[in-house]
C-alpha cells in the first residue's frame, strides 16, 4: 500500500513510539575488528529455519517448504549494515526451471505481509473488506487463490519493516535505505543474493510490487537487468504508484490529478447502485478523456462549460450538487471521502471508498480519524504473521514486527516527483523482447487510481506485435484481492502470463 496524507494523524502518534531503526540487531558474522562491527551491537536474529506445510490451492493439495531467513546487506567496505528478513515458500522436487516470484509491498514502510497473507501466499487472513475488524481472530486458512502451484514465492521485507533492520545509526540508515534510489539498489542486490544462496539463477524470475512496491518493481527489474546482470521474465504491478509526477497537484495547470481520480469515484458510485460493469466504466473513461478535460481547461471563461462539468460530475459521484458546484467540478479525494457517506455518519477509505467506518468526529471541519482500512488491517496481519513466524516456523525472536511503519514513511526522502518507474519500465521492456508486464488495479482505489495506469500504458510504444504490457481492473479497491472473486480473476490473469 501507499501511505497518504490521510494517515497523517496516526503518523503523528506513531512517530513518538515506532523506531526508524529496529531495536535488535546482530553483529556481523566473524567480525574481529571494531571497524567490522555494526554501529548497533544487539542480540542476533535466529538462524534460517524451515518447516514443511501443505495447503489446498485450486483443486490440488500442495506440499511446500516455508522458510524464514535473513540476507545481510553490506556497504562498499564489506561491513554488514542491515539484515533483510524474507519468507519463502518453495515446492520441493521441482526442476531448475520452476519460476520464482519476489514480492514487495509499498508505503514506503509496509512489510510484504499484505501480499503474503492477503493475496498470493499459501495461507490467507481476511482483511481490507467492509466489516473486517482489528479484533477479528488472526487465523490463517488455505488460500485457494495462491500462486504457489505455478511459482515459488519469496516475500521480502525492506529495512525498517517486518523484522528487517538497520545496523547503523539514524542518519546512516536514512542515507543507505530510506530514499528512492538507494532502496532500489540494495533490494535488487537482495534478490540476487537470494538467487545465489538458493541456487536459482536458472529459474524464470518474476518481480511483484504493490502500491509503492509498484514504483520499486520496474526500477529493481532494470537494476537487475542492466547493473547486476540478472534477467527478469515478468513484472506484476499491483495497484501501482507508477508515476508520482502525474499525481503531483502542485501545478494548477495540470488536469491529470482530477482526471485520474474521477473514474474511481464514479466506479464506487456505480457499485453502490449495483451498476458497475466494464461497459459502464468505458463510458466514464470516454467522458473523462474528452468532454471533461475540455470543459475543465476552459475554466471560468466559459460558464456553460462549468455548468456542464458540475452537472456531469454530480451524476458520476453521487455528491450533493451544491458541493460539486462550489468545487467547480474539481472534486479532491479528501473531500469526496468525507462527504460521500456523511448522511450515514461514516467516512470512506482512500483504498476503497465503499469500505467505511464510523466518523468519530462528524462535526469537525476536516477528517480527524485515520483511514478505515488502514486502522483495521494492522492488528490481524501483524498477529497472524508473528504467530506464523514464531510459533509455526519456530523462528523465535522478541524483536518488534513492523507491518506498517509510519516512522520509515516519515523519514523517507522522496526526491523530486518524476516518471523514473515508467522510464525504467520502458527501457527494461525495450531491451528484452520476452519480458511480460501485468498491471492490475481495483476500480474503487483512490490511493493509486487505475486511470493513471490506463493513461500511462496508452502512451507507451507497442514494443512489438504482441501485447506485452497488459492492464486489468477488478471489483474492489487498492487491495482488491481481499475479495475472493477478484483474487481468483487476478490468479487466472497471472497464470496466463506465467504460462506464456
Image (cartoon, rainbow, N blue to C red):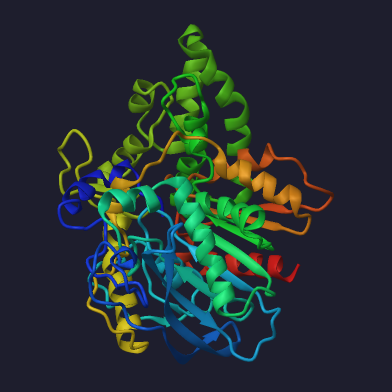
Quarter-of-image position of residue 225 = bottom right
Q: Is residue 239 visible?
A: no
Q: Residue furthest front?
A: 33
Whole-percent x, y for residue 278 in the image: 62, 50
Residue drawn 30% across and 65% down? 38
Instruction: Name the residue nearer the viewer: 81 or 13.
Output: 81
Q: Which quadrant, please, contains the N terminus?
A: bottom left
> In the figure, is residue 217 to the left or right of 131?
right
Q: Is residue 447 above or below residue 186?
A: above
Residue drawn 35% across and 49% down? 3
Q: Is residue 361 above or below residue 488?
A: above
> In the figure, is residue 455 to the left or right of 272?
right
Whole-percent x, y for residue 347 in the image: 28, 47
- Count the labels in the image: 0
Whole-percent x, y for residue 401 in the image: 28, 69
Q: Residue furthest top?
A: 301
Q: Which quadrant, please, contains the C terminus?
A: bottom right
Instruction: Name the residue nearer the viewer: 325 or 399.
Output: 399
Q: Is residue 441 visible?
A: yes
> In the figure, is residue 48 to the left or right of 492?
left
Whole-percent x, y for residue 103 in the image: 51, 65
Residue drawn 37% across and 23% down? 327
Quarter-of-image position of residue 368 = top left
Residue drawn 84% across and 50% down? 465
Amino acid at each position: 500500500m501507499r501511505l497518504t496524507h490521510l494517515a497523517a494523524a496516526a503518523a503523528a502518534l506513531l512517530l513518538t513510539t515506532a523506531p526508524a531503526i529496529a531495536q535488535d540487531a546482530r553483529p556481523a558474522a566473524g567480525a574481529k575488528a571494531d571497524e567490522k562491527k555494526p554501529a548497533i551491537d544487539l542480540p542476533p536474529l535466529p538462524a534460517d529455519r524451515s518447516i514443511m506445510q501443505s495447503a489446498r490451492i485450486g483443486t490440488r493439495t500442495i506440499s511446500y517448504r516455508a522458510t524464514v531467513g535473513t540476507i545481510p546487506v553490506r556497504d562498499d567496505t564489506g561491513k554488514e549494515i542491515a539484515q533483510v528478513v524474507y519468507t519463502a515458500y518453495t515446492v520441493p522436487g521441482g526442476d531448475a526451471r520452476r519460476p520464482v516470484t519476489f514480492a514487495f509491498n509499498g508505503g514506503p514502510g509496509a512489510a510484504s505481509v499484505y501480499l503474503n497473507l492477503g493475496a498470493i501466499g499459501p495461507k490467507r487472513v481476511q482483511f481490507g473488506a467492509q466489516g473486517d475488524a482489528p479484533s477479528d481472530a488472526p487465523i490463517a486458512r488455505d488460500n485457494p487463490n495462491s500462486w504457489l502451484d505455478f511459482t515459488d514465492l519469496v516475500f521480502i521485507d525492506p529495512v525498517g519493516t517486518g523484522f528487517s533492520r538497520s545496523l547503523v545509526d539514524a542518519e546512516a540508515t536514512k542515507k543507505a535505505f530510506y530514499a528512492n534510489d538507494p532502496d532500489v539498489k540494495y533490494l535488487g542486490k537482495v534478490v540476487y543474493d537470494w538467487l545465489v544462496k538458493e541456487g536459482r539463477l536458472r529459474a524464470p524470475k518474476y518481480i511483484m510490487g504493490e502500491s509503492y512496491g509498484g514504483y520499486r518493481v520496474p526500477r529493481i527489474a532494470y537494476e537487475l537487468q542492466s547493473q547486476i546482470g540478472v534477467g527478469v521474465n515478468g513484472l506484476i504491478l499491483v495497484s501501482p504508484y507508477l508515476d508520482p509526477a502525474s499525481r503531483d497537484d502542485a501545478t494548477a495547470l495540470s488536469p491529470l490529478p482530477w482526471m485520474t481520480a474521477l473514474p474511481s469515484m464514479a466506479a464506487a458510485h456505480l457499485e453502490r447502485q449495483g451498476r458497475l460493469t466494464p461497459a459502464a466504466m468505458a463510458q466514464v473513461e470516454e467522458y473523462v478523456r474528452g468532454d471533461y478535460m475540455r470543459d475543465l481547461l476552459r475554466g471560468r471563461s466559459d460558464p456553460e462549460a462549468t455548468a456542464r462539468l458540475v452537472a456531469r460530475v454530480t451524476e458520476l459521484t453521487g455528491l450533493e450538487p451544491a458541493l460539486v458546484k462550489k468545487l467547480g467540478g474539481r472534486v479532491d479525494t479528501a473531500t469526496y471521502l468525507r462527504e460521500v457517506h456523511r448522511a450515514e455518519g461514516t467516512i470512506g477509505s482512500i483504498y476503497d471508498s465503499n469500505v467505511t467506518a464510523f466518523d468519530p468526529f462528524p462535526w469537525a471541519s476536516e477528517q480527524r480519524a485515520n483511514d478505515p482500512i488502514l486502522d483495521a488491517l494492522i492488528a490481524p496481519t501483524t498477529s497472524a504473521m508473528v504467530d506464523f513466524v514464531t510459533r509455526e516456523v519456530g523462528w523465535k525472536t522478541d524483536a518488534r514486527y513492523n507491518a506498517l511503519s509510519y516512522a520509515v514513511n516519515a523519514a523517507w526522502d522522496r526526491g523530486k516527483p518524476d516518471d523514473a518507474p515508467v522510464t525504467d519500465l520502458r527501457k527494461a521492456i525495450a531491451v528484452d523482447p520476452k519480458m511480460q508486464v501485468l498491471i492490475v488495479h481495483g476500480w474503487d482505489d483512490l490511493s493509486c487510481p487505475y486511470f493513471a495506469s490506463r493513461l500511462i500504458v496508452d502512451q507507451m510504444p507497442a514494443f512489438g506485435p504482441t501485447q506485452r504490457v497488459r492492464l486489468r481492473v477488478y471489483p474492489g479497491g487498492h487491495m482488491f484481492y481481499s475479495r475472493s472473486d477478484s483474487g481468483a480473476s487476478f490468479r487466472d490473469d497471472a497464470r496466463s502470463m506465467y504460462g506464456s
